[in-house]
Structures are given as C-alpha cells and as structure tokens.
Image (cartoon, helix red, strand yellow):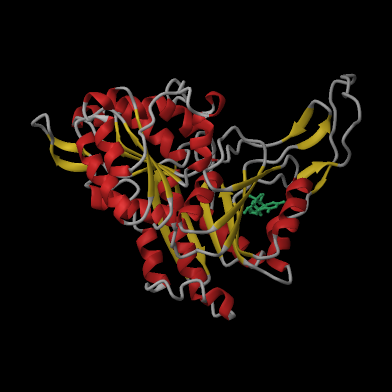
Amino acid sequence: MKGKRIVLGVTGGIAAYKSAELVRRLAERGAEVQVVMTAAAQHFVTPTTFQALSGRPVRSDLWDDGHAAGMGHIELARWAELVLVAPASADFLARLAHGLADDLLTTLCLASAAPIAAAPAMNQLMWRNAATQFNVDLLERRGVRMLGPGIGEQACGEHGPGRMLEPPELVACAAALLSPAGPLRGRRVMVTAGPTRECIDPVRFVSNRSSGKMGFALAQAMQEAGAEVVLVSGPVSLPSPRGVRRIDVESCDQMYAAVQRELPGTAIFVGTAAVADYRPVCCAEQKIKKSSETMSLELTRTTDILAHVSASPQRPFVVGFAAETHAVEQYARAKLLAKNLDLIAANEVGHRKAFDCDENALLVLWRGGRIELPSSSKLELARALTGLIVERYLEQPDPGERRSASAGEGADGADTARELAAPSGVRAS
Ligand code: CTP
C-alpha cells in the first residue's frame, strides 16, 4: 500500500472512533490518507484526532476557500486511488445511492473514477430496513463495494448485523481493492450486453426486451476477478460498472465492428448480448408513411458475432448465452457444439422471465459437464458464473499465456475459481 492515496470518508456514527485506528494502520502500511469528515461525524470524533494521525488537515467543507477556486472536491476526487467510507451511516448510503451532492464527501464520491468502498455501521434494524437494503443493493449494482457489516453486539445494546468491520479487516479489504490480485489479473475480458437495434427507418427499429442487466453484472464480476474488462453494449439504461471500459453501439453491425477492433489480446469473450438475428434488408432514409392495410418487412440474417469470434484465428476462450422458451438444455447444448463454444449459460425466457428481471437462474454447460446455478440476484449469479468460467479457462491445455494467469499468485487458479463460485455469505467478502 506504500504511497497509495486513500480518501477516508468518516460519517456520523459511534464507530467513527474506530476510524482513528484505521487511519493509523493505513499510515503504518505506507498509504497516504486524506480524511474527509461529514458534519455529523464531527459530533463523534474531532478533526484534530484524524489530523494528528494522518498528518494532513481534515477536509469537510465543500466551500473551503483555501482550495483551488472552490474545486476542492474535484481535486480530491482525482487525487484518490480509493475512496473508503468508514463508518458509512444509513444516511450516507441513502445520499450516495440517490446521487445527492450536498457536502464534500458525497460530491467527491460522484466526481471520482476511483473505486468506492463503504463499511456500513448502524443499528441492526436500520441495516435491515427495506430502504437501507434497497440503497445498498443499488450501490452494489453500481460497483460500490460493501465491506461488511459484521454481526454482533451493538453499541445500542442490541445484537445483529450492523457492526463496522474491525480496522485490520478494513485495511486488508483496502489493500485488495488497491491491487486487485484476482485470478484474471492481467487478462482482458470482453463482454457484449444488451439488445441491438436494427434500423427500419429514421424513427423505427427492430429490437428485443433485453435490459443488459446480466451482461453488466458479468462485466462487474469479471472486473472484481481482476480482469481488464471491455463492455460492448447495445442501448440500455444502466450505469457503467466501475473500472470497466464501455463502448456503446446500436446495431449488430456496429457491435461486430467494435468486437473485431477490440478482439486482439482478448483472453475471454462472453456474448451476453441479445443480438438481433435478422435486420431489415434496407433502412429507409425517410420515415415510412402508412399506406396499405398490411405491410411486409424483408429481413436478412445478421452476422453471428459469437460464431465469428469462435472461428477467429486468435480465438479467445468463448462463452455464449442461450435464451430459450422451451427444451432449454437440448437447444443450449446444440448451440455449444454448433458455435464451437467453450461454455454456454442458458436460461429460460418468456413473459416476466429473465428479461428485465433482477433475478435469474442459469444452466451452465460445457463439453463433458453441466451445473445448475439456482435463482439469485444477477450480480450473485454473475459472480458464480465468473467462478466457473475462470475454472474452465485455467484448465485449458493452452499455451503458457493462459496458464500463466494463475502463476505466481500463491493460489491454485482452480481453488481461487471455486472461491469465486461460492455464493458469499457476507457482502463483498
Ligand atoms: N449472438 C451473437 N450474434 C448474433 C446472434 C447471437 O453474438 N447475431 C450470440 C449471443 O450473444 C448469445 C448467443 O449468440 O451468446 C445466442 O445464440 P443464438 O443462436 O443467436 O441464440 P438465439 O438467437 O436464441 O437463436 P435461436 O433463435 O436459433 O434460438
């Protein structure tokens, strides 16, 4: 952690006193720590304590005259390599989830490209409250890492989840976030997501119900596993997962062009996009006016991006998706073979199933194997699927390149993959 720049946000909660020790331990590891306190935090601990331990004046005011033309939040947002908020109160999580920017800490969180981690600390009923859980879920889906909370005796005398993790645990989490050492470290993963739009005329298109949620969750899970992730997305209304490079496209042709451009150096390709199988033969230059009672639209096949990637000379490890309304396993296995995939994840789709839902279940198939991943949130599912992909990928009898992914990390890649595949009991463990 030597020389790593950490903004430590301290919000209002009894656990703020533990943050003093957290600063000391981060500083011992060589990190540069800039403490930012909310007004509420100052009711629990004085800035003087943090100033003495961090060796830097504590920042708390959005309107601090001493900083470049009132742009202190931007300067801090750029400076940070990690924003760690500990303790993170229910109020802070709510404000961050809703994009409020009414104090220095929330504003710099919005303005920073650095990873954000929050260590929640609050009464167990406040933690369990549906509003808090909703906010936490929203933040996690946007890539904010929740560190804890722990379960146990609380300052208020109650027992349950809501304790801030202890400083040594938080230091370990911060170290992991600052130098991700996941099994895919140094590997590039490309994920396609969302629907495509195939133009009929300037105002109309052919498309489908895909929301892109599964692809975005997978991009996030791959990034958490240490990969450099390129996400090629059709039109969706989802925020980009943190630390992921996103390329927006509309049509199958544009998606294919982006994939071809990014393919060199890609170790794993995951096609989650619901690419249109057909597009109108031509796109009218002007809006088509209604005339006859019926009209026909002539369609032609689009390029099968997944099949092309699989047949490319520098073929990466290729993962496909299959959305089926019936005979799921039979069709999925046929696609695995027809497109020469390394692995396929299949799900049942239909009215109110899979598309645009937050939960899903998957049947994962590869040559000689199958596993069912039961229904859970798309992010949990994506993490489990990433674990399976990593396991298969590292088993490939391929050229040193692939093998070296697990070398030197002190852990056998397959073990690491199993850890990833195991649904975590504790958030962001
Ligand atoms: N795919 C692709 N390019 C296309 C079509 C599909 O890359 N033009 C990818 C999807 O991202 C997904 C997989 O192929 O990973 C789905 O296979 P596909 O055979 O297209 O599935 P369906 O469209 O469901 O096929 P069918 O209608 O024959 O069931």
User: Splitting the image into 4 quarters, where does residue 319 fall?
Assistant: bottom right
Query: Quarter of the image holding residue 276?
Result: top right
Query: Relative to residue 240, is residue 413 drawn left or right?
Result: left
Q: Position of residue 348 (x, y in %)?
A: 51, 46
Q: Quadrant of the N terminus?
A: bottom left
Q: Residue 182, located in which quarter of the rendered image?
A: bottom left
Residue 147 seen anywhere in this rendered image of the structure: yes
Instruction: Establish if 364 lies above or below 367.
Output: above
Q: How many marks?
A: 0
Q: Of all residues shown, which one is farthest toward the left?
A: 157
- Horizontal and vertical percent for residue 90? 30, 27
Q: Residue at x 43, y 54 (%)?
A: 3
Image: 54 above or below 413: above
Rendered position, 72 above or below 172: above
Lateral position of residue 172 relative to residue 383, left or right? left
Residue 2 is situated, as x and y percent measured from the top left of the image, at 40, 58
Q: Is residue 119 left or right of residue 71?
A: left
**Residue plotted at (46% across, 51% down):** 382
Residue 211: x and y in percent read 58, 37
- Image point 85% across, 39% down: which residue? 298
Residue toward you, 227 or 306? 227
Viewer can see residue 360: no
Nearest the eye: 167 or 340: 167
Looking at the image, residue 424 lies above or below residue 391:
above
